Amino acid sequence: MRLDADGVGIARHDGKDFIVAGAYPGEKVTATIEAKGQFRLVGRLRRVIKAHPHRIAKRCDSLTSCQGCPLLCLDEAAQFEIKQIRIRSAFNQYPQLKGVEIAPIWSAPEPFGYRSNAKLVFGRKRGMVQLGLYRRGTHDVVDLAGCPLHHPLINRIASVVREEVEKQEIYIYNAEKGRGLLRYLLIRVSPSRNKAMVTFVVAERDLKQLPHLAKSLQKRVPEVVSVQQNVNATTGNIIVGRDTQRLAGVTDLLDQVGDIRLQLAPASFFQVNHAQAARIYQLVRDWARLQASETAVDLYCGIGGIALHLARDAGRVYGIETIEEAVKNARANALLNDLRNCIFIAGDAEEVVEDLCNEIQRAEVVVLNPPRSGCQPQVLKAAASLQPRTLIYVSCNPETLARDLSLLHPLGYAADAVQPVDMFPQTAHIETVVRLVPITL
C-alpha cells in the first residue's frame, strides 16, 4: 500500500491499481470494488484488520466515499511526516536541491472548519436531490450532510439549498441526457465578516426559478449577501463558465486578511484557509524587506493578496494575473486599501512578463505564486532577468516547485530558506514558501 499525491491509498489487485481512500501504508484492510476501469479499480474501505500506528477515530461518515480529506484518520504527526517526505522526495530528484534544509511545517491553528469556499455538484438519486462531491474516478455524486473541513456557514447554506431545490422541484442537470438546470453550487465565505456569496452554475440562463430560489435562500440564511448564476453549457469537466449574472444582493464579497481588505468575485481565486494565508503573506513581506524606493513584481497575483501586502512597504508593485475578473478585483482592492502604488496587468504571465521586463528592467523583489502546474520556463527566465535581490516562490505542488527551483539554479538563484505551511489539514496537499537569493561564486 502506498499513497498517491492526493493522499489516497493505492494497492495492487489483479495487475491493476486498486484505489482505497482511508487506507494507509503498512495497513491490512478489506475493501469492496465499486468501479472498474481498464487500468484501475476504485474500492471502498470496509474494515481495518491491521491499523497504522498513528490511526485515530474516524471524524466523518462520508470519508470512504467522498475521499476529499484522505488523511482524516491520521494524527497531525503522521500527516506532517507524509508531507515532509513528499517535499524531500521531490527535492531529491535534483542534485542541486538535495542539501537544501526544509524547516518544520507550520501547523494550522484550526485543523477543521477552515475551508472558506466550496464547489459542490448537484445530483439526484432515487428521486432525492444530492449535493456533494464526485466519488473518485466516477461521476457518482456523494451526498454530503456536512463536511468537517468546511466553514460552518458553508454547511448551513448547502443544507438549505438542498431543501429548497427539493421543495421547489428545480431540475438537476443530467450529463448523460444533456438536460436539466442546476449543475454546481459554489459557496464563498468571508470568515472575517461571517458573510457568504453563493453562485449557482447552470446549464442555461434562468430568470424564472433561480430568482425565487435566491430569495428563499437569503430569507433563511441572512448571512448570504450575494447570489449569482453562472452559465456553463459545455459538456466537459470545466465547472465555471464565462457568463455570470447577479441574482440578488451585492456583486462582490468583502473580506479581510491581516490588515488588507479584499473584494472577491465568484470566479476569483483565493486561498481557502484565511489564517494560514495571512501567515504566508506576512512571511513574504518579512522576507522581501522592501524599502520605499524599491520595486516588486508579483506574478500570478490573483486578487492582489500578496501584492497589496508588499505595497505597504514598496515604492511600486506590479501584479500580473490571467483572470480578468481577478484583475478588476485587485485594482479595486488597491483603492479599497488606499494603495496608489500598484499596477495590475491582465494576461498570461508567460505572454506579459517579457514586456514588463523591458519596461521596468529591474525589480528588487519578485514573487512567483503559480498554479499547480508551476511556471513556464520563459517566466522563470524573465523573473531572473529582473535581477532581484530576493526571489520568493509560493507553491502548492512540491513536484513542480522542485522542478522550477532546479531551473532557476542555472539562472543564478538558489534556495536559502524553505518553509512548508499546512494550508490544507487532513489532506496530502502542502503549501511551501521558498526564498531564493543570487548565487555568489
Image (cartoon, helix red, strand yellow):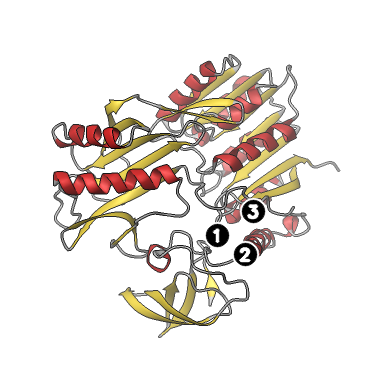
Tell me the CA gap for discs 3 and 2.
Answer: 17 Å
Residues 310 and 400: in front is 310
Counting residues from the start of the chain, the first of labels 1 and 2 encountered is 2
Residue in view at x 28 percent, y 63 percent = 140
Estimate the x, y position of residue 22 in percent, counting from the top left: 48, 70
Secondary structure found at label 2: helix
Residue 401 visible? The answer is yes
Secondary structure found at label 3: helix
Instruction: State the quadrant of the C terminus.
Output: top right
Residue 324 visible? The answer is no
Seen in the image, is 339 located left or right of residue 255?
right
Residue 247 versus residue 276 in the image, above or below:
above
Counting residues from the start of the chain, the first of labels 1 and 3 encountered is 3
Secondary structure found at label 1: loop
Name the front one of labels 1 and 3.
1
Does the CB distance between marks 3 and 2 fall below 8 Å?
no
User: Hey, what amino acid is under mark 1?
Assistant: Ala
Estimate the x, y position of residue 349 in percent, counting from the top left: 52, 34
Tell me the CA gap for discs 1 and 2.
Answer: 7 Å
User: Hey, what amino acid is under mark 2?
Assistant: Ile
Residue density around tag 2, few if under 14, some if 14–19, many if 20 or more, within 10 Å: some
Q: Report the disc number at residue 428.
A: 1
User: Hey, what amino acid is under mark 3?
Assistant: Ala
Does the CB distance between marks 1 and 2 fall below 8 Å?
yes
Count all numbered tags in the image, as a single digit. 3
Q: Which residue is mark 3?
A: 402
Identify the residue at the far right of this view.
Answer: 441
Q: Report the disc number at residue 82.
A: 2
Seen in the image, is 48 located left or right of residue 277?
left
